[in-house]
Amino acid sequence: MAADKLPAIPARTDALPLFGRIVSGAMVGASVCGRRQRVACVLTGAAGALVAAYALTAGRRVAARRRIPNAVAGTFEDVLALVAGLWLMRRV
């Protein structure tokens, strides 16, 4: 989470970071599902990571246009991601 705030880190929607997020989402999806639903959970986790990458990037752009400090926007984004993840975990 901290590294994501550094200026030297490439955009989350660049090919390599996006690929890493998709793989990570797929692994999380696989780890929270039973064997019979594994493929669906892997695909859902990967899709969730892809959608989140673009949605949170759009949210950051809106925050920047509204002159919300980057640290505040980043903290809100992290909290939103954690709360959404916990909420989804309870539904699996």
Image (cartoon, rainbow, N blue to C red):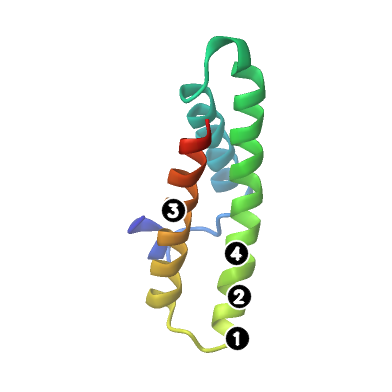
Residue lying farthest to the left in this orientation: 2
In the image, which is nearer the foreground, mark 3 or mark 4? 3
- Label 1 sits on residue: 65
Mark 4 neighbour density, 10 Å: few (under 14) some (14–19) many (20 or more): some
Q: Residue at x 60, y 26 (%)?
A: 42
Q: Earlier in the sequence, mark 4 or mark 1?
A: 4
Q: Is residue 28 above or below residue 87?
A: above
Alpha-carbon distance for marks 2 and 3? 21 Å
Q: Earlier in the sequence, mark 3 or mark 4?
A: 4
Q: Along the horizontal axis of the image, is 52 left or right of 71?
A: right
Whether residue 13 appears in this view of the structure is no
> What label sits on residue 83 in the rendered view?
3
Mark 3 neighbour density, 10 Å: few (under 14) some (14–19) many (20 or more): few
Which quadrant is home to the N terminus?
Answer: bottom left
> What label sits on residue 57 in the rendered view?
4
Q: Residue at x 55, y 55 (%)?
A: 12
Mark 1 neighbour density, 10 Å: few (under 14) some (14–19) many (20 or more): few
Q: Position of residue 4 (x, y in %)?
A: 41, 58
Q: Is residue 85 above or below residue 89?
A: below
Alpha-carbon distance for marks 3 and 4? 18 Å
Alpha-carbon distance for marks 4 and 2? 6 Å
* Three-letter amino acid code of the residue under disc 2: Arg
Whether the residues at callouts 2 and 1 have beta carbons within 8 Å, the answer is: yes
Q: Nearer the viewer, residue 35 or 60?
A: 35
In the image, which is nearer the foreground, mark 1 or mark 3? 3
Alpha-carbon distance for marks 4 and 1? 13 Å
- Which element carries disc 3, helix, strand or loop? helix
Whether the residues at callouts 2 and 3 have beta carbons within 8 Å, the answer is: no
Q: Position of residue 9 (x, y in %)?
A: 45, 59
Q: Nearer the viewer, residue 61 or 39?
A: 39
Residue 7's quadrant in the figure?
Answer: bottom left
Residue lying farthest to the bottom in this orientation: 67
